[in-house]
Image (tube, rainbow, N blue to C red):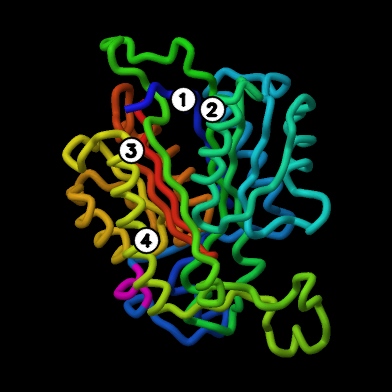
């Protein structure tokens, strides 16, 4: 097991107040039912951004709360990494808007795009900046306004997603040791990232980019919205998240029995159950909130981790497995001791 370079000093979340239940889809003209959605996904409701709420506003709220819990002032942040598939604009990065909102005037701020795996990619990158001596304090945020890029006429996708943001502050692990056991340092014990671009078109937004700019045809085809081959995505998600869990455990020289809590990407309860079974982590040690938030893409693990800490599921000494899968395809994992 490596000596950690960075530890999680604080977490935060920012979610819209507006709740959209499965029963509410009828008011949007979507032909579906509560039972159909729950049986296939485990989702009961999700949060939807109101008019005026943006990726920046949700990210800023999550970041502000994470910094407060970490006892970090905005001017102490050396890097601000925003993972998002729903930037408020394409140029410049939404991260600079978050930086300006928070007053993190010393930070290098940039967006990262790795879909649902993006927050773990961001934590890994933040840890690398700290290990390289390029930063002492890094704010990593995953924020998504998925309601802006889903097709509300496509019941196969629109029922899955929600809006929100999750954040964590990483700090250098110079003295970051568990108080009751100085032989066991806290921090990031292992991490893993992987992607496979050959499968990109199984989960993507075909239109609206530089190759296929917005046009009357793009709008007519509704190709600016998320398209997904559900069965294929499910199959690859289970396989890839299982691999990611194995790689993180191997990297930390741990087994599923050593894990106090697993926090997977919250996409589908069946994917979560399959991943937990493969990792030999019982479901009573798996954090699930997909029923209340749906799939918030790169925000999901950050939101869940903040909730788990707030409710006491994660406390000092806890060893936590984080694992994700997303468009690209991308997949990632991390083991963190708190």
Q: Residue at image x 31%, y 49%?
A: 245
C-alpha separation, residue under disc 4 versus residue under disc 1: 26 Å
Q: Mark 1 points at which residue?
A: 7
Local secondary structure at mark 2: strand
Residue identifier under label 2? 170
Q: Determine whether 263 is above or below 80 in the image.
A: below
Please identify, in this view, whether the residue under mark 3 or under mark 2 is nearer the observer.
3
Residue 43 located left or right of residue 275? right
Q: Do the residues bearing badges 1 and 2 touch, measured as CB atoms within 8 Å?
A: yes
Measured from the top left, where is residue 153 in percent x and y? 58, 84
Q: What element carries label 1?
A: strand
Q: Residue 240 carries which label?
A: 4
The x, y position of residue 189, in whole percent, is 37, 30
Q: Nearer the viewer, mark 4 or mark 1?
A: 4
Mark 2 and mark 3 in contact (Cβ < 8 Å)?
no
Chain-order first, disc 3 or disc 2: 2
**Marks 2 and 4, Cα distance to the nearest angstrom?**
26 Å
Sequence-first tag of 1 and 2? 1
Which residue is disc 3 drawn over?
A: 251
Few, some or many residues within 10 Å of mark 3 (<14, 14–19, 20+): some
Q: Does the magenta stretch include residue 49?
A: no
Main SS category, magenta section: helix
Asked whether disc 4 touches disc 3, contact meaning CB atoms under 8 Å apart, the reply is no
Is the residue marked by circle 1 packed among few (<14), some (14-19), or many (20+) residues within 10 Å? many
**Mark 3 secondary-structure assignment:** helix
Residue at figure coordinates x 48%, y 23% from the top left: 5
Please give left or right for residue 105 compared with residue 135 in the image. Answer: right
Image quadrant holding the N terminus, namely top left
Looking at the image, is mark 4 or mark 3 earlier in the sequence? 4
Where does the magenta region start and end? 37-41
Mark 3 vs mark 1: in front: 3
């Amino acid at each position: 097991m490596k000596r950690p370079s960075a530890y999680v000093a604080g977490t935060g979340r920012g979610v819209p107040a507006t709740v959209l239940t499965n029963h509410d889809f009828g008011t949007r003209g979507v032909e579906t039912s509560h039972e159909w959605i729950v049986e296939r996904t485990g989702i009961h409701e999700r949060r939807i951004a109101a008019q005026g709420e943006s990726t920046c506003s949700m990210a800023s709220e999550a970041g502000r709360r994470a910094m407060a819990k970490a006892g970090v002032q905005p001017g102490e942040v050396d890097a601000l990494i925003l993972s998002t598939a729903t930037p408020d604009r394409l140029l410049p990065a939404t991260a600079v808007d978050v930086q300006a909102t928070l007053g993190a005037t010393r930070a290098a701020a940039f967006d990262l795009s790795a879909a649902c795996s993006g927050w773990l990619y961001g934590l890994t990158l933040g840890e690398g900046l700290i290990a390289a001596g390029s930063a002492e304090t890094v704010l990593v945020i995953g924020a998504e306004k998925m309601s802006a890029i889903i097709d509300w006429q496509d019941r196969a996708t629109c029922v899955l997603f929600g809006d929100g943001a999750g954040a964590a502050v990483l700090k250098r692990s110079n003295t970051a040791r568990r108080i009751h056991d100085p032989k066991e340092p806290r921090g990031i014990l292992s991490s893993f990232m992987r992607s496979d671009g050959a499968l990109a078109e199984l989960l993507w937004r075909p239109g609206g980019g530089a190759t296929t700019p917005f046009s009357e045809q793009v709008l007519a085809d509704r190709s600016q919205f998320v398209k997904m081959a559900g069965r294929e995505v499910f199959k690859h998600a289970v396989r890839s998240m299982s691999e990611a869990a194995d790689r993180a455990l191997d990297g930390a020289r741990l087994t599923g029995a050593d894990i106090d809590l697993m926090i997977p990407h919250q996409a589908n309860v069946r994917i979560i159950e399959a991943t937990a079974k493969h990792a030999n982590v019982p479901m009573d040690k798996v954090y699930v909130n997909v029923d209340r938030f749906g799939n918030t893409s790169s925000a999901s693990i950050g939101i869940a981790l903040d909730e788990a800490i707030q409710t006491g599921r994660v406390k000092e000494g806890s060893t936590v497995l984080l694992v994700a899968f997303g468009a690209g395809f991308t997949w990632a994992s991390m083991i963190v001791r708190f």
